[in-house]
Image (cartoon, rainbow, N blue to C red):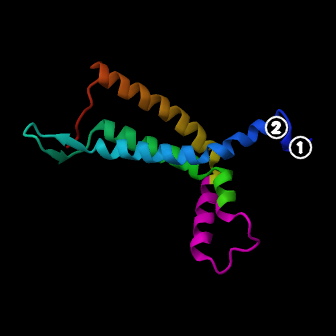
């Protein structure tokens, strides 16, 4: 039967969601970038760092490690060819994804816990329960 029949076919669903995961990283990176800028009160913004900036940036890093370590991305980058010789950029990308793939479970657990914490942090700051401490 193999992977073409239920229930193993469900394991292949994540291959089709990879583009959406990569797009999500773009949106989360934008949020982390926006968290670096603070209103001055005079209608302009200045560069700064807060605890929320660190939380949102760590969120992107951990989810990025998990997403870039996915074997679907590894197959997409290195699949279809027998040798990576003569393709230095593709080889470097493949080795990077392979490094992340070797730690895929660690990335998964760390990002799972951190996403939950980041969501709680943002929610409690928005409610006024927690204060987003500004470092500079």
Q: Picture quarter containing residue 127? A: top left
**Residue 97 inside the magenta-drawn segment:** yes
| Residue identified by numbered label 1 | 2
Q: Earlier in the sequence, mark 1 or mark 2?
A: 1
Q: Residue at x 62, y 71 (%)?
A: 91
Q: Determine the secondary structure under disc 2.
A: helix
**Residue 93 inside the magenta-drawn segment:** yes
Most common SS among magenta residues: helix
Task: Please provide the residue range marked out in magenta.
Answer: 77-100
Between 13 and 89, the one nearer to me in the picture: 13
Q: Position of 66 compared to 43: left or right? A: right
- Give the Cα distance between marks 1 and 2: 7 Å
Image quarter of the C terminus: top left
Q: Picture quarter containing residue 12? A: top right
**Above/below status of 123 relative to 77:** above
Q: Picture quarter containing residue 125? A: top left
Q: Determine the secondary structure under disc 1.
A: helix
Q: Is residue 62 visible?
A: no
The location of residue 120, given as percent across then percent down, is 41, 25
């Amino acid at each position: 039967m193999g992977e073409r029949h239920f229930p193993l076919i469900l394991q292949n669903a994540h291959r089709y969601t990879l583009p959406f995961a990569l797009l999500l990283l773009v949106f989360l990176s934008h949020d982390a970038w926006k968290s670096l800028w603070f209103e001055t009160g005079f209608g302009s913004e200045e560069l700064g760092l807060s605890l929320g900036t660190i939380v949102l940036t760590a969120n992107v890093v951990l989810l990025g490690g998990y997403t870039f370590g996915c074997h679907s991305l590894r197959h997409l980058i290195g699949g279809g060819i027998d040798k990576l010789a003569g393709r230095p950029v593709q080889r470097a990308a493949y080795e990077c994804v392979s490094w992340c793939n070797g730690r895929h479970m660690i990335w998964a657990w760390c990002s799972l816990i951190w996403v939950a914490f980041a969501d709680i942090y943002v929610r409690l700051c928005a409610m006024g329960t927690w204060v987003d401490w500004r470092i500079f």
